[in-house]
Image: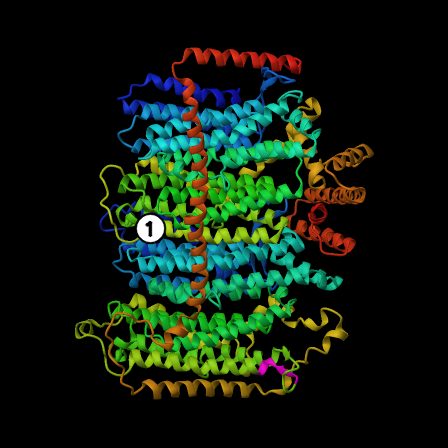
Amino acid sequence: MTNIPLWLIPLFPLLGTIILASIAVASSPNKKGAPEGIVGAIAVLLPAMSFVCVVALASTMPDSGIRETICNWIDIPLLKVDIGFLFDGLSRIMLLFVTGIGTLIALYSIGYMHGDRGFARFFAYINLFLFSMIVLVLSDNLMLTFLGWEGVGLCSYLLIGFWNKDLKNCKAANKAFIVNRVGDIGFLLGMLCLITIGGAGALNYDLLNQFIQMLIAGGHVELVLPMLSLAAVLFFVGCTGKSAQIPLLTWLPDAMAGPTPVSALIHAATMVTSGVYLVARLSNMFVLCPDVLNLILVVGALTAFWAAFAGLFQNDIKKVLAYSTISQLGYMFMAAGVSAFDASIFHVFTHAFFKASLFLGAGAVIHALAGEQDMRRMGGMIKKTPVTACVMIFAFLAIVGFPGFAGFWSKDLILERIFTNCNWVFTGTWLADGAVPMNKIFYVTGLFTAVITAVYMGRLIIMTFFGEYRGDKETESHIHEAPAVMLIPMIVLTFGSIFAGYLWAESIGITFFADTLAPVLSAAQAFDPARMFNPDMMLEEFIPRITTHVNPMLFAALGTLAALFGMFVAWKGWGKAHIPSVKGASTAPEGYAKGWTFLWDYVHLFFIKAVLIVAWICDVVVDKVLQAFQWTISAIVSIVGDGATVFQVRKVRLQLTLSLFGVALLVLVVLLTGGLV
Amino acid sequence: MLLHLLVFAPFVAAILMVLNSKEDFRSATRMAILFAVAFLGLSIALVAGGNIATTPMEWFWIPGCKGPTYYYLYSHGLGAWMVFLSCGLSLVALVSARGLLGMNYRNFAIGIFSLMGAMNGTFLAADAVLFFFFFEAMVIPAAVLIASFGGEKRKEAAMTFAIYTLVGSAPMMVALWYLLTFADNSLLLSIALAVQGLPEATQLVLLICFLLAFIVKTPIFPFHGWQAITYSEAPAPLSAILTGAMSKAGVFGFIAWVLPVFPFNMTEISTMVWLGLASAIYGALMALRARDGKKLLAFSSMSHLGIAVAGVFSLSEAMLPAVLVLLVAHGISAGVQYFLIGVAERMTGTRNIDEMGGLAHKAPAFSFLFGAAGVMALAVPGTAGFVGEFTVLLSLWDLSPVCAGIMGFSMILSAAYVLRFIQKVIFGEAKHECKEGVKVSGLEGVAYGTMLVLLLTFGFHPAFVTESLHLYDAPAAEQAEETAVTEEVIEEEVEEEEEGEVEPLESHIVNSSDIAKLDSSLIQAGFSEEERKELIKQVIETEANIARSTALALEKQAREETQVRGVEDKDYEINDAEMEGHPATDAAPVNEKEASND
């Protein structure tokens, strides 16, 4: 076991943030800005050192994990929280790809951000993001996770609005932060629920798990179940915000306003998956609430399906990828909803590679076309930028689930688990059979979504790389392959998107990935909700699991068929089709596609309008009434005052009379009441 | 000595400032800042030194009153931190005001020092009359400063401010006088005892009189009419002091003077909590629509203080440290935001945020500070605001989840208006040319930067703030035994009568005389026979529980192992759960009691 303290891992990016922020502020009056060489070196080396630490720790970690309490954070009655870190199977996987991909994307950004005025500021934000993300996954309690949780949200805000001269970007950034804030309040209230049940100690993951075990052992689950379910729902609300699920998903497509490396790192590979991480981390709590798991399953399925369709309608290359990310996140939540937490983390892992490759490739394309993002103005790029095209095509094969590529293994596993693990049966007297096993419905939804995934991704690849170039001639002459500093990270990630799946390829007997997660997740996954309460009563409502009846090869074959069919449809639809040239600058879809794409924006708009109307009432009605009231009183006082001045004119005789009268009255009162005191 | 110095030396400094000439700007600034640094040093010593008190000196007899009024200063955790805010913000205000060219700096400094002295007096007074004296005295220098250095409508603003707040506290003066006619003297204990003997209806009237003064000062909806115009017309450095330190006098009054003196019933508590939450939402909504940058900050301040007041009246165990951290965090973050919007105002020449913009490119250092201050006002974890807001949220959750939900909504709204504010001021394209020579000076930048660093420090180590409450506890208990003229005792007693079981003295053992006392006060509070029996039974049970948990806690401390601590926490919580047939935290019996009160 190596003796690297855990706090070193977040320390490096934090140092990077402080150094780079100082450079950024110090160089701001300087016209040229900070030297890019030094800034870039700091920005890449510090995350790389974190990565080295993680690798060193990961290779020698004991199965039970490493725990480290640094110091006390908050210590008041009702709330005691420590700053502590927990390095176990789950945080190991997350940290490896967070720091690894983070370093690669920082390297890529040196090329992408070359010549930008805010070069140092950009890398200060990236390092702050990595710090927050590391804290999020490494912390041993929910409060510290929340620090990372809001920290990554803040960095996302800063980076989406990075080019802040354009108010459109600022608005997208504000939207991202505010929508996330809604989810964060869910997270906060969820923590309060847990404190209500188990005291402040329940915020610590280890103690929470022990507490839940004690509950099960003592038969107290029923007592806390309402509060626990509420906590689970509230945490899931937090996850829908961070991981862009229905209904809090509208911010992610808008977030594409940020620089493309940011989209790759934050809005595809790492931050948006933290919701999945949280569900896996709290898996022991979630499995106690089967209804909440069903909710997660439904939300995940709806999101996956809806976003895949929305991806089909986009013309902006980054928007397609954004909706694709939402859709893939939906898959991950579907897996979590059927208690297959390891499968969901596996998909997080493979998705990080292929989606980052896709985004970086899209970034290279945009870079080559001098900022053009509309796919209708692209085409034929494979001749001009062959390396980028290869990277994207490999990543494309991974995301559609072509056999042998990373996405094949993880997506297939999720679909299989949905079919085998889901024992939710929908009952109703109005149904023909009286009961519908939901596993089939969700499996078909997942499979159909996989077909659409292949269609929209195929469309993206065909419109970008094949056919004729459709942009203006001037840009065409400048199209160039990206510099090496950008290509190297892309190629490394491509290797990841091809081979990452072989860490858990069950059909060829590799279960390495599942084994590393087993110490953390196996307890939750093996948990049978039927035994939680009275076994006799509950077993009737659950149908037994049907793991053995289906040949796993059948799932693989169906998944492959779905991918191939989708690719075929895409080739039929867009391979030869003439794409109409665009008139306006807008890339937004029109007609029915617009309605589908912005469905949830309309829902949000309803709430926003409601708040604005109430604000208007406060401002225009309530405040004016209060002011009117206030001025009425003051007016009355001044009128009475004016009246009183009558006595203040020079009428000596009247004033003398009044004074004498007053004194007489006072004396009378004193005499009658028996003197002062 | 420290206390005397903190209260009177500012007035002396104000007089000494007269030595400077009106024209000699530089020497006036140097002298003022040197004085202010010295006061800040004193206030830090006060915060670090725990609680101290002066010897009570008889001040004067109010005609018609039974006992004398004392000149008696007393410092405890809460007051000490408020004094720190007042001294610190005054220092930064004096630094910041150097940038406001073309004003009479000497007179400004005189005003600031008098205001500081009055505020320190308010936060340190242990005598009700002394407190009221300083509480009213604060208004005058502030109003004069607004009238002399404010914006276009400064006269109107100064008048509104002075009249509104003075009228607001007039009922308190009458109520106080009435109480003094039969209280032994004007110290807290005597007043509290005097209130206990009164019929309930009279108590309620007196309570409303007291509450009104503090509600107006904080301000709480619907008595906030003076706030927006005052804060927006006052010069920005003064607005920072007004919101950062002076408005705290209201919340301070609730904690230090209303809660220990008056017995509360559930209706009053819930009314205050709802008023606090209403201000939180109302302030946030108004801030969402505000176009004037300083008005926006005024409403945001109202929103945060509304949350603080709701937190105070949640009366949970965590209330005092939670509200203290929230107040300190808000004082610093609202203060620095006001200073910075003042800088923006002098750079662009307007307060209208629609006409600002593009400062991120023109003044990057300023924008960095501005953005950081804004983000810290959002209560992002790692800043003091988060610790304060989360703990207050916890207190409110203890009271009722609905309240916590409303507070959560106001937190969402706060994100909306703060981000809108940041976007309008520093992002986008510039709409105005920067004037020359009024950018953030080095010293100013350091001062604002230090405030932001303080927010981060308290965010990661709130013990700096919360520890001061422990300092307050231990010696106070000793003093209580000796002199019996200590606020601690009263607070304990009153809490005992109200929510009694929550925080008994550590060595507290229920004996028959205690029960009798509790019983009699319950009779006064109008509880029926059955209810009283039920309550007393609960008290005894809770006592037993607490004794047990204290023993456990001692064991825990002995071991000093954090990991083990949590497990045991749960151990006895589960015991509790088994005993009472439902999952219970320590606070559950209280909730039950409150429910039965209802």
Way the structure is coloured: rainbow
Q: Is residue B382 visible?
A: no
Which is more toward the observer, A159 or A522?
A: A159
Q: On the picture, is B287 further left or further right than A296? A: left
Which is more toward the observer, A338 or A236?
A: A236
- The chain to which mark 1 is attached is B
Q: Is residue B148 visible?
A: yes
Q: Quadrant of residue B557?
A: top right
Q: In the rendered image of this protein, does residue A571 appear above or below residue A251?
A: below
Which is more toward the observer, B112 or A369?
A: B112
> Label 1 is placed on what type of residue?
Lys
Q: Where residue B593 sits in the image (x, y, percent)? A: 72, 46
Q: On the picture, is A335 further left or further right than B433? A: right
Q: On the picture, is B378 further left or further right than B556? A: left
Q: In the rendered image of this protein, does residue B585 appear above or below residue B147?
A: below
Q: In the rendered image of this protein, does residue A178 appear above or below residue B342?
A: below
Label 1 belongs to which residue? B424
Q: Quadrant of residue B39?
A: top left
Provide the residue span drawn in magenta.
A434-440
**Element type where label 1 sits in the image:** helix
